[in-house]
């Protein structure tokens, strides 16, 4: 015990002298907390500025424009009298799109034909383009419903009867998962797990590769003792980082965990052990500090896209899915989604728990073996 404690103290003091490690840990936690969620902050596009060219000037066209202005997706910023004016506003960026109601719109509706509405926008910006198109479709649906009711009333069908037919069924939409119906609340818990996973691997690599180039008590230690020292350096630090990421950081982004803390920490403990063990094993394979860190940083985005919640697993090649299954972040991310979105009980997370504990044991054995091989070379 005294030998282990002496080794831990020496490695702990060396840790605080390692500027690269400290910058990676503290700056990484802060920068990734802001950088990675940034693409998901604006979950939907709203209030897209559009310019309107109403050639018809009819009751129907004005109703359509009122319905369009009531949609959350667009805001009517200007009305023009010529096509060139609308094109100039769109090309200059003052408007995201144009809605053109041609002459004869109401006359076509009165004759029972389809009225034409022309929508133009820059399709290179597919989210604003899709939002404008959806808003025009919603407004047109409102107008077509009014026209349909009017036709049936004029044909002799009672208005009260028709109204009861339209409103006979009330739609009550209750989401089975993701109660907020937001992309951020869906992706962020799993994304934070991946950030912690990658940072832990990088820090483990920096600790291990930095040790091989210097002398110290570690040269007289056994592989099992050195492995336990590394666990004692990594796991408590990242347990605190996990408390920050999955606590105040999630609340800052208005994301709430539906599951219990017992179930969460039941997965986090084997996840931290497995990730630390994997990092220690990888560090035993190389001596260059920069090599492993560069590989791990570059692998972050591919790992995110094969995680199974940003991109469907069914659309991914089977070898990639199998390779991803070896990474401790995979069962932890899947468990976080179940816990966060569905409020899963501990019993519902048994497949993820068994996988995480299995990885902790397997990577722990590999780490002890790898450290032992490294000690033999020294």
Image (tube, rainbow, N blue to C red):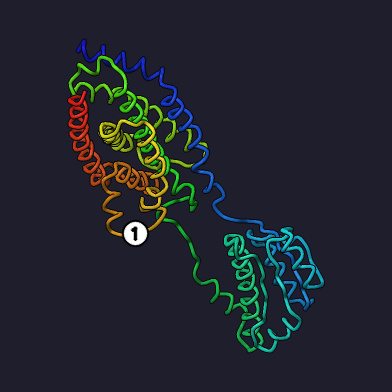
Q: How many marks?
A: 1
Residue 157 position within the rendered picture, expressed as x and y whole percent measured from the top left = 60, 85
Quarter of the picture holding the N terminus: top left
Q: Using the rendered view, name the quadrant where residue 224 is placed.
A: top left
Where 330 sits versus 228, above or below? Answer: below
Nearest to the observer: residue 328 or residue 187: 328
Q: Residue at position x 65%, y 74% from top?
A: 143
- Name the side, left or right, on which 207 lies relative to 153: left
Residue 61 position within the rendered picture, expressed as x and y whole percent measured from the top left = 73, 75
Quarter of the picture holding the C terminus: top left
Q: Secondary structure at mark 1?
A: loop
Residue 300 position within the rendered picture, expressed as x and y whole percent measured from the top left = 40, 44
Q: Is residue 233 visible?
A: yes
- Name the side, left or right, on which 54 lies relative to 276: right
Query: Label 1: few (<14), some or many (≥20) within 10 Å?
Result: some
Q: Residue at position x 27%, y 56% from top?
A: 319
Q: Is residue 193 visible?
A: no
Q: Using the rendered view, name the quadrant where residue 60 is placed.
A: bottom right
* Residue that protrudes farthest toward the right in the picture: 81
Q: What residue would you read off at disc 1? A: 316
- Name the side, left or right, on which 39 lies relative to 322: right
- Name the side, left or right, on which 172 lies relative to 350: right
Q: Residue at position x 37%, y 58% from top?
A: 312
Residue 316 position within the rendered picture, expressed as x and y whole percent measured from the top left = 34, 59
Nearest to the observer: residue 88 or residue 64: 88
């Amino acid at each position: 015990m005294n030998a282990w404690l002496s080794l831990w103290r020496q490695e702990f003091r060396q840790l605080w002298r390692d500027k690269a490690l400290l910058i990676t840990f503290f700056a990484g936690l802060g920068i990734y907390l802001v950088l990675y969620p940034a693409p998901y902050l604006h979950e939907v596009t709203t209030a897209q500025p559009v310019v309107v060219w109403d050639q018809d000037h009819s009751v129907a066209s004005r109703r359509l424009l009122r319905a369009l202005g009531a949609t959350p997706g667009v805001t009517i910023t200007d009305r023009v009298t010529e096509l060139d004016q609308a094109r100039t506003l769109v090309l200059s960026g003052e408007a995201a799109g144009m809605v053109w109601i041609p002459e004869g719109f109401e006359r076509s509706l009165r004759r029972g034909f389809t009225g034409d509405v022309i929508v133009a926008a820059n399709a290179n910006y597919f989210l604003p383009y899709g939002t404008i198109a959806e808003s025009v479709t919603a407004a047109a649906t409102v107008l077509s419903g009014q026209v349909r009711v009017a036709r049936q009333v004029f044909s002799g069908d009672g208005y009260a009867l028709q109204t009861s037919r339209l409103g006979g069924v009330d739609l009550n939409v209750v989401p089975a998962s993701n109660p907020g119906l937001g992309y951020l609340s869906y992706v962020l818990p799993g994304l934070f797990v991946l950030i912690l996973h990658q940072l832990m691997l990088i820090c483990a690599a920096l600790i291990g590769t930095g040790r091989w180039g210097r002398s110290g008590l570690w040269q007289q230690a056994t592989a099992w003792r050195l492995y336990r020292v590394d666990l004692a350096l990594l796991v408590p630090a990242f347990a605190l980082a996990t408390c920050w990421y999955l606590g105040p950081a999630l609340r800052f982004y208005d994301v709430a965990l539906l599951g219990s803390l017992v179930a969460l920490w039941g997965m986090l403990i084997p996840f931290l052990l497995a990730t630390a063990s994997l990092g220690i094993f990888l560090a035993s394979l190389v001596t260059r500090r920069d090599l492993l860190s560069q590989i791990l940083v570059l692998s972050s985005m591919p790992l995110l896209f094969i995680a199974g919640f940003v991109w469907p697993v069914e659309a991914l090649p089977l070898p990639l899915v199998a390779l991803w299954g070896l990474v401790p972040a995979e069962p932890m991310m899947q468990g976080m989604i179940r816990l966060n979105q569905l409020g899963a009980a501990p019993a519902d997370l048994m497949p993820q728990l068994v996988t995480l504990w299995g990885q902790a044991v397997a990577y722990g054995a590999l780490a002890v073996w790898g450290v032992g091989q490294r000690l033999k070379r020294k």
